[in-house]
Image: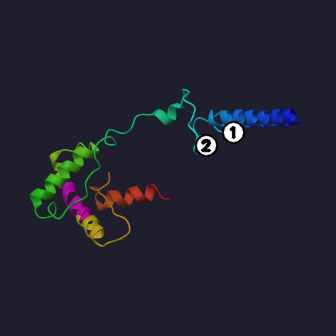
Amino acid sequence: MASAAAARSTAAVAARAAAARHVASGTGRSSPLFPRRGFAAVTTTTTLPAAWTRPLPSHAAAAPMPSATRLDLASEEAMWALYERWCAFYGVKRSRDDMLRRFGAFKEMARRIHEFNKSGASYTMKLGERADLTAEERDRFYRSNSF
């Protein structure tokens, strides 16, 4: 009987080891994309859908657009330099006359965002893609894209 018990014990140990190898291999109730915690994922090549692999926008790889600082708001020249950096960051191409026309709206938006960020709120704002829209353009944009 001792040998029968030893055989059952050896078989149980072997079965547990096989089960552990099965789970650790990633083939048992887990997938390569979502492996179980504590176990290594299977190193197979998975083909991703094309929508998951589309290229990032040109400004996504670059450093984020910095928000307006106290120094940027100190003078008209510094504010104009910030406006030119903003245009370059977002790839905005405007004529000199159009830039001059929109510069006032941009200055007001930059000042408003700077004051909000100084307020100590739980989040911060940044100069986004529509920072130089005039009041009429902003109204038209948000009316046409109502939520």
Badge 2 amino acid? Arg
Q: How many marks?
A: 2
- Disc 1 to disc 2, how far (Cα)? 9 Å
Badge 1 amino acid? Arg
Furthest residue in direction front, as rendered: 2
Where is residue 60 shown, x and y percent of the image?
Answer: 34, 43
Q: Quick check: marks 1 and 2 in contact, CB under 8 Å?
A: yes
Q: In this view, does 133 lie to the left or right of 98?
A: right
Kindly state the secondary structure of the residue where label 1 is placed.
loop
Q: Is residue 37 left or right of residue 57?
A: right
Front residue of 123 and 80: 123
* Residue 3 found in image quarter: top right
Residue at the spot of label 1: 29
Q: Earlier in the sequence, mark 1 or mark 2?
A: 1
Kindly state the secondary structure of the residue where label 2 is placed.
loop
* Residue 136 found in image quarter: bottom left
Q: Please give the label number shown on residue 36.
A: 2
Task: Name the quadrant of the N terminus.
Answer: top right
Where is residue 88 shown, x and y percent of the image?
Answer: 22, 44
* Residue 90 found in image quarter: top left
Residue stretch rendered in magenta on the structure:
101-110
Where is residue 21 shown, x and y percent of the image?
Answer: 66, 33
Q: Is residue 72 left or right of residue 50?
A: left
Residue density around tag 2, few if under 14, some if 14–19, many if 20 or more, within 10 Å = some
**Residue drawn at the location 23% of the way across and 42% of the way down:** 93
Above-or-below relation of 46 to 100 = above
